[in-house]
Image (tube, rainbow, N blue to C red):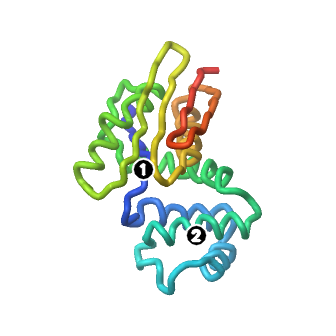
Amino acid sequence: MRKYYFTIFIRNDMHGIISSFYKEFIQEEYGKEMLRQIEVSGELEKNAFSQEGSCSEYDFLALLDTSCRIVSTNREEILVSFGRYIAPIMLRTYQGLVHEDWLLFDVLENIEGVMIRTVRRHNIQAPQVYWKAISRKDDCLELSYTSPRKLASLGVGIVQALSTFFNEPIKIQRTDFEDHTVLIIIRA
């Protein structure tokens, strides 16, 4: 019996959900010394991280940009990798919201209606992130992602990780617009 859930959102206060996992990701991918170097060379406020590892949205974005500079990559690449890293964690954390019989397209199609709406009920200050299915056919799902943070690449990585988890090979076609991103997910 499979019960898993993941989410694509970043809360205003971060509460460690994304920031602490991002720090773990950097440490696992690049090492403890690299994480220390990123933390001290960034534009982070002194003592920006709480003991739990959370930080403000501003500091998270500064940490992200500093990471990109130090490891010589861009935001898109590091967010896709981070999305692949965080998907299994989120699946375990929120497993109770996914129906046992759901497969990849079912999970992706229900993110907004079931999962993100649940987050908004518990955190009324959560940013207006929308991840909704526009259309679905047997082998194709079209999704629209809208967020002021423009971190759609995190979602791309999560979708890639879920594809592996559900053993459903896919191809992703991405189109970025000024106010949203469209992902067309095609079963390979």
Q: Position of residue 104 (x, y in %)?
A: 48, 28
Q: Quadrant of residue 64?
A: bottom right
User: Percent x, y for residue 123?
Assistant: 26, 56
Give 104 or 133, whichever is nearer the viewer. 133
Q: Is 64 above or below relative to 115?
A: below
Point out the image quarter for the C terminus. Answer: top right
Q: Which residue is mark 2?
A: 63
In three-dimensional space, the C-alpha distance between marks 2 and 1, rounded to whole angstroms, equals: 17 Å
Number of the label disc, if any, that sits on residue 52: none
The three-letter code of the residue at mark 2 reads Leu
Which quarter of the picture shows residue 2?
top left
- Disc 1 target residue: 9
Of helix, strand and loop, which one carries label 2? helix
Closer to the camera, 167 or 74? 74
The residue sitting at the right extreme is 72
Label 1 neighbourhood size at 10 Å, few (<14), some (14-19), many (20+)? many
Locate the N terminus and report the quarter of the image it occupies: top left
For image coordinates 37% across by 62% down, the residue present is 12
Residue occupying the point 67% across, 61% down = 29
Q: Looking at the picture, how far across and down is residue 26, in whole percent?
A: 62, 65
Sequence-first disc among 2 and 1? 1
Q: Position of residue 80 (x, y in %)?
A: 62, 48
Drawn side of residue 25 relative to residue 53, left or right: right
